Image: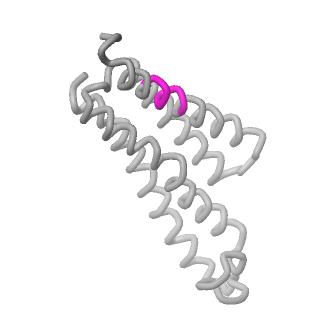
Amino acid sequence: MTVPAIMLPVFIQVALTFAILFLLGPRRGRALKAGDVKGDPLLDDGAWPASVRQASNSFRNQFEIPVLFYALTAFAMIAHKADLIFVVLAWVFVLSRIGHAFVHLTSNDIRLRFPLFLVGVVVLLVMWVLFALSILFAPVLP
């Protein structure tokens, strides 16, 4: 696969992270102006109103499971193991993250959010297993 094809899902995931950050800032600003912050928000996330915590949690979530995606993509590129299957799975992972973030930032309905999270986690696990097998059995597999 080409470098742009491999990296495009990464760029979209990074863009999603920045989009959530740029949504979080104004939410915090509005909460501060409206006097909706109860306590010290620097020490207690619970001081923020629910809509701000929701966006903050979604932003924080972008630095949990996606970190394994970033690492895997870099390793797969270095090892020349990012094939078509890798790129398709990367897109499934990123689309699941977009869906997860959308639900997280809107209804926050766990019945919708969890399946999207699970799809992303399972796809990422499959990607890691395939990558590990391609490295461990490199002399045997093409």
Q: Which residues are magenta?
A: 125-130
Where does residue 78 sit, x and y in percent of width and height? 24, 35
Q: Can residue 128 be found in the magenta stretch?
A: yes
Q: Residue at x 71, y 40 (%)?
A: 114
Q: Residue at x 66, y 76 (%)?
A: 45
Which quadrant would the N terminus be assigned to in this image?
top left
Q: Residue at x 50, y 33 (%)?
A: 93
> Which one is in front, 133 or 85?
133
Q: Main secondary structure of the magenta part?
A: helix
- Is the residue 79 above or below the residue 69 in the image? above
Where does residue 134 sit, x and y in percent of width and height? 38, 21
The answer to which quarter of the image holds residue 57 is bottom right
- Is the residue 111 above or below the residue 50 in the image? above
> Which one is in front, 141 or 2?
141
Where does residue 18 sit, x and y in percent of width and height? 41, 57
Where does residue 47 sit, x and y in percent of width and height? 70, 81
Q: Residue at x 41, y 27 (%)?
A: 131
Which quadrant would the C terminus be assigned to in this image?
top left
- Is the residue 66 above or below the residue 43 in the image? above
Q: Can residue 89 be found in the magenta stretch?
A: no
Horizontal placement of 39 versus 65: left or right?
right
